[in-house]
Image (spheres, rainbow, N blue to C red):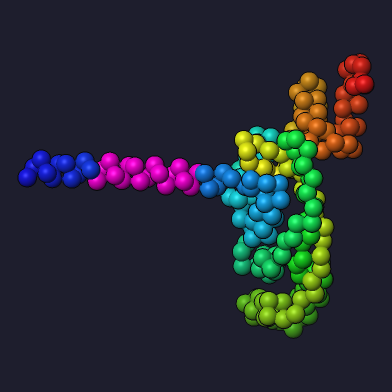
Amino acid sequence: MGFKTGFEGCFRHVLFTFLAAFFLIAASGCTRSCGSTPEKAAENYLKAFFENDLDTTWNCASERDRAVKERKSYDMIHEVESDTIAAKLAKQARVSIVSAETEGMRAVVAASVVMPRLDIVVGDMLGFAFGAAASGMEYGEFDRALKSRYLKGSVPRGASPVILFLVREEGDWKVYHGWEMDKALELERWEKYDEALEHWRAVDRIIPGHPVAAARIEEIYRKTGRAGPR
C-alpha cells in the first residue's frame, strides 16, 4: 500500500513536472514567434500595437532593439489604460498589408491602417470638456457621456500608410525600430566612437540611406580623422 501510494505520488510529481515544462516550452514558442513571413510579422505587430498588447509588440521587436531597451521602460512609454476612449477606438483599427519587398535578411512592408480619426475626436473632446466644465458636470457623468458620444456614435474614419522595416532572426521575422540610435547618440556623448559607429552602421545596413545614420557616420569619421567609406 505504501509502495503504491509512494509510486502514485512520484508519478503525479513527474507528470506535473513534465506538463509544466511542456506548457512553458509551448508558451515560450508562441510568444517568441512574430511571423514566418515579413507580411505576417508586420500584420501581427500592427494588430497587437492597436490592441495595446505589449507582450506581443515587445516580442516582435528585433534582438538589436531589445538589447538597448529595458522591458520596464518600454511598458512605461507604451502602456495605455484600456478603459480610455483612445484605447477603445484604437482597437477598431483594421490593418491591410499593401506590399512587401525582401532582400536577404531584411524586408520592407507597406501597410494601410483604417481607424477612427483620433485627431478629430481629440479636438471635439476638448470642446466638449470645456462645455462640461462650464456646466458643472461631474467627472463620472462626463466619462459616460464621452463613451456614449464616441463609442456608440459614428466617428469619421481615415486610412493611414505605415512602413515597417523587418529583419529575419532564426527563421522568424521581427520589426526593426532603430532604438539603437538613441544608444549611439549616448555613446557619442561619451566619445565612444567605435561603439557608436557599430550601431550607426547597423541602422544604415537595415534601413539603407537613413539620413540620420548617414550624417552621424560622416560626423564620426570627421571627428576621428578617419577616411570615410568608399
Which stretch is magenta?
12-28
Using residue 229 as the reference point, say whether residue 124 is left or right of it: left
Quadrant, the C terminus: top right
Which percent across, then down, holds residue 187? 77, 27
Which percent across, then down, holds residue 185? 80, 32
Which percent across, then down, holds residue 28? 50, 44
Which percent across, then down, holds residue 109? 77, 49
The one nearer the camera, 213 or 123, is: 213
What residue is at 82 percent from the left and 68 percent from the top?
A: 158
What residue is at 91 percent from the left and 32 percent from the top?
A: 215
| Residue 226 is a magenta residue | no
The one nearer the camera, 146 or 55, is: 55
What residue is at 65 percent from the left and 54 percent from the top?
A: 44
User: Where 95 falls versus 102 (above or below)?
Assistant: below
Using residue 2 as the reference point, say whether residue 178 is left or right of it: right
In the rendered image, the residue lying farthest to the left is 1
Q: Is residue 212 visible?
A: no
The one nearer the camera, 32 or 125, is: 32
| Residue 23 is a magenta residue | yes
Majority secondary structure of the magenta segment?
Answer: helix
In the rendered image, the residue lying farthest to the bottom is 135
